Amino acid sequence: MTILNLIFLYFFTIVISYLFGSFPSGYILSKYFNKIDITKQGSGNIGATNVLRSGSKTLAILTLLIDALKGAIPVILFSFNGYLMAIAGLFSFLGHNFPVWLKFKGGKGIATYLGICFAVSLDLGVSFIALWLLAALIFKTSSISSLITISLIPIISFFRLENNIISLVFLLMTINSFYKHKLNILRILKGEEPKINIF
């Protein structure tokens, strides 16, 4: 493969993965079915948690599933190459968090992170869900559960996966998601973060 072909392949991977990730499912579902602009409701986030707070469990579940698929599909598409798979995961995640369609104001990436985990390894995806549910059972707060889970996934992946590039990508995703959760972290420190009731 020539250098030009290689550059094109990497560029193609980035563009396709970003476009998959940038599909604003929570925004579109809320706009079409609930006739509301989710970016002006609650936290203003387009993710499943804010869709749930807007009053629709069904739309929240659909948002969660679609957002997870946005991360999983690009990773699966480019799974024939470890480096491309890692790039696909990273840019689908960034697409969700910074969608061009919404002036780069997107979600926090948790559902997309989950989808990427499942696409990389079934065990890793199951570990993600188990950790999140355990933390949610203890703290009853979505953001705390998410932050604990994504803090552990890079470590778990490092010891369970052969492709350490993926572990590095998980670490970068975790750092970015912590940044996107900055207001949640401030509310957690003040004891003002809303509780969830999913059990």
Image (cartoon, rainbow, N blue to C red):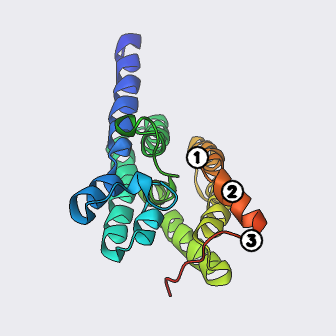
The quadrant in which residue 99 appears is top left
Q: Secondary structure at mark 1?
A: helix
Q: Residues within 10 Å of mark 1 (few under 14, many from 20)?
A: many
Q: Earlier in the sequence, mark 3 or mark 2?
A: 2
Say which amino acid is labelled 2: Ile
- Tell me where residue 45 appears, x and y as whole percent: 47, 54
- Tell me where residue 140 appears, x and y as whole percent: 62, 79
Say which amino acid is labelled 3: Gly
Q: Are marks 3 and 2 in contact (CB under 8 Å)?
A: no
Q: Secondary structure at mark 3?
A: loop
* Any part of residue 46 in sight: no
Calculate the distance from the C-alpha at mark 1 to the C-alpha at mark 2: 13 Å
Residue that label 1 marks:
173
Q: Are marks 3 and 1 in contact (CB under 8 Å)?
A: no
* Any part of residue 139 in sight: yes
Residue that label 3 marks:
191
Q: Are marks 1 and 2 in contact (CB under 8 Å)?
A: no
Q: Secondary structure at mark 2?
A: helix
Q: Where is the N terminus found, in terms of image quarters?
A: top left
Residue that label 2 marks:
155
Q: Residues within 10 Å of mark 2 (few under 14, many from 20)?
A: some
- Tell me where residue 13 appears, x and y as whole percent: 37, 32
Calculate the distance from the C-alpha at mark 3 to the C-alpha at mark 2: 28 Å
